Image (cartoon, rainbow, N blue to C red):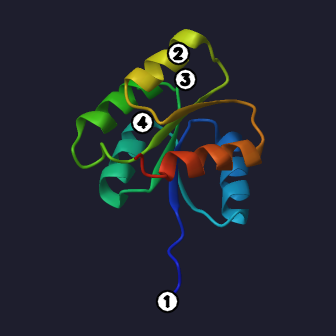
Amino acid sequence: MTKRKTHILIIDNEKEFSFFTSANLEAAGYRVTTARDGYNGLHIAAKNHPDLILLDILMPAMNGFQILEKLKGDPATRPIPVIMISAIHDEERIKKAREMGAADFVCKPFLTTSLIEAIEAARKPFP
């Protein structure tokens, strides 16, 4: 039996970022789906139940904190680990993300190896 690939949903309005991050994660053996906005991302998360979500903070219409609140407020998507990603990072945003239920916060730009380490750490069950 073949091992199922880890499915990652990237919710980010930056097309180039999503393209390159997807390509790097797929090359590392992950299955990746992308959403360019929060509404589409919420729909995909509820329908497909990815193993993990990478969520940008700065997006039009609905920002990452609003999306995170909806994900963690829905019993169907609450268990999905969410890693917040942003080019703007300060202690307040990082603290807020963790308080709202984010598994981690990764600052853009990042090395793919660092992102994969964060993904694998977020997927491990807590004792």
Q: Residue at 66%, 50% (x, y): give it.
A: 116
Examine the rendered structure and indicate whether residue 52 appears above or below residue 3. above
**Residue 61 at x, y percent in the picture:** 42, 25
- In the structure shown, which secondary structural element does the residue marked by tag 4 occupy? helix
Three-letter code for the amino acid on which mark 1 is drawn: Met
Question: Residue under circle 1?
Answer: 1
Question: Residue under circle 4?
Answer: 38
Three-letter code for the amino acid on which mark 4 is drawn: Gly
- In the structure shown, which secondary structural element does the residue marked by tag 3 occupy? loop
Quote the CA–CA distance across marks 3 and 4.
Answer: 11 Å
Front residue (pair 92, 18): 92
Question: Residue under circle 3?
Answer: 58
Q: Residue at 64%, 18% (x, y): give it.
A: 88
**Residue 127 at x, y percent in the picture:** 40, 47
Q: Which sits earlier in the primary sequence, circle 2 or circle 4? A: 4
> What crowding class fits label 1: few (fewer than 14 Cα within 10 Å), some (14-19), or many (20 or more)?
few
Quote the CA–CA distance across marks 2 and 3.
Answer: 11 Å
Q: Which sits earlier in the primary sequence, circle 4 or circle 1? A: 1
Q: Residue at 70%, 30% (x, y): give it.
A: 108
**Residue 93 at x, y percent in the picture:** 52, 15
Question: Residue under circle 2?
Answer: 93
Q: Which sits earlier in the primary sequence, circle 2 or circle 3? A: 3
